[in-house]
Image: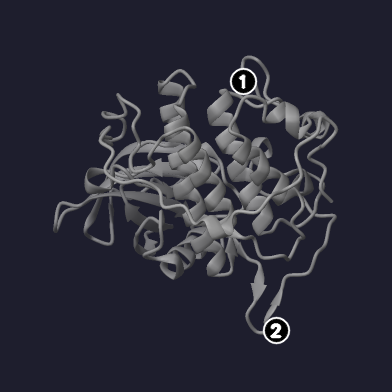
Amino acid sequence: MNKVPIRVDGRFRLGDILGSGSYGIVYRARNIINDDDLAIKPEPLINNASSLEHEYRILKHLEGGAGIPRAVWFGREATFHALVLDLLGPSLHDLFITHNRKFSLHTVLNFGDQLLSSLEHIHSHNYIHSDIKPQNVLVGRGDLEQTIFMVDFGVTKEYWNTTAQAHMPFCHGGHLTGTPAFASINNHLGVVPGRRDDLKSLIYMLIYFLHGSLPWFTSDHEKLPTSSILARKVDTTIEDLCLGIPPEITTMLIYLCNLAFSEDPDYDYLRSLLHNSVRSFHYTSSSIPERALSGQGGASVSTKDNASLQINSSCICPLPPCTATTQYLDL
């Protein structure tokens, strides 16, 4: 097996391993010319196709959007492709574990507001992320310590055919895309995922942070077979899932369950529900207020609030109340 080169493109020196997973291995790196701290994802040259090149092109297309990390460089070094990115802090998954699986409502609503803006930006550029989960959301560093970033665009795809000017067709019979724990039921059943599925994954994640778990997790968070996760999701009513959380989040989920496959999500409406939840609980959403977030991967997060959410009341409209028989099955 070939060793990963110590230096990439002559200027990026690899350091310690930051993390590893289905996406491969990520290394800390430094630009020896300007001393910038970076992250590098290497990929062996197995064939001409490169998932890192796919990710690089998407990141450049999305560059400058809310919560989108900067792609610095992509190219070949020895027998590897390499993608160089700005170095970010810890993932929300790691922070959640550090905080004994407890985030304040303030913090969770802040995450939801930022991630909704990120998904709106991604979707506005005709992409769906397809793997929204705590491990794929990282906290920024330095001046960006109050910002969270969406990462790992390896399974991201276009939902809009720009040539035909048409939404991708509804179809089923495929395989699940992304991570089973945070995937929608339709995704489990082989229905091609769309924008609504990204947004449902976001709601699952917010509920996970508020409850500390999800009904399809085991008590010791042991991994279950995908089929068992699906069975538990189908058996879980929205009322049971959303017990004890702000009703606005329940309303968001009901709205998404009623959204047609190719229908444009109303991001302003969803945002207004989050903002109403903040207003109802007398919180602001300007910062990530959890203490002791510093010292994790270089991130340092303050507790200072300096702005409040602006609520657009024109986006608010009633939806039917949740009932005990309402389920996630939304074909």
In the picture, the disc for residue 164 is 2
Q: Is residue 200 or residue 141 the one in the foreground?
A: 200
- Residue 325 in view of the camera: yes
Q: Amino acid at mark 1?
A: His
- In the rendering, at what x and y percent does residue 121 appear? 49, 63
> Could you tell me residue 57's position as x and y percent?
47, 68
**Which residue is located at x 23 percent, y 60 percent?**
10
Q: x, y percentage for residue 145?
A: 28, 42
- Which residue matches tag 1? 221
Disc 2: CA contacts within 10 A as few (<14), some (14-19) or many (>=20):
few
Question: Rounded to the nearest whole Å, what is the CA distance between mark 2 and mark 1?
Answer: 45 Å
Closer to us: 301 or 284: 284
Density class for disc 1 (Cα within 10 Å; few <14, some 14-19, many ≥20) is few
Specify which label sits upstream in the sequence, 2 or 1.
Answer: 2
Q: How is the image coloured?
A: one colour
Q: Nearer the viewer, residue 126 or 115?
A: 115
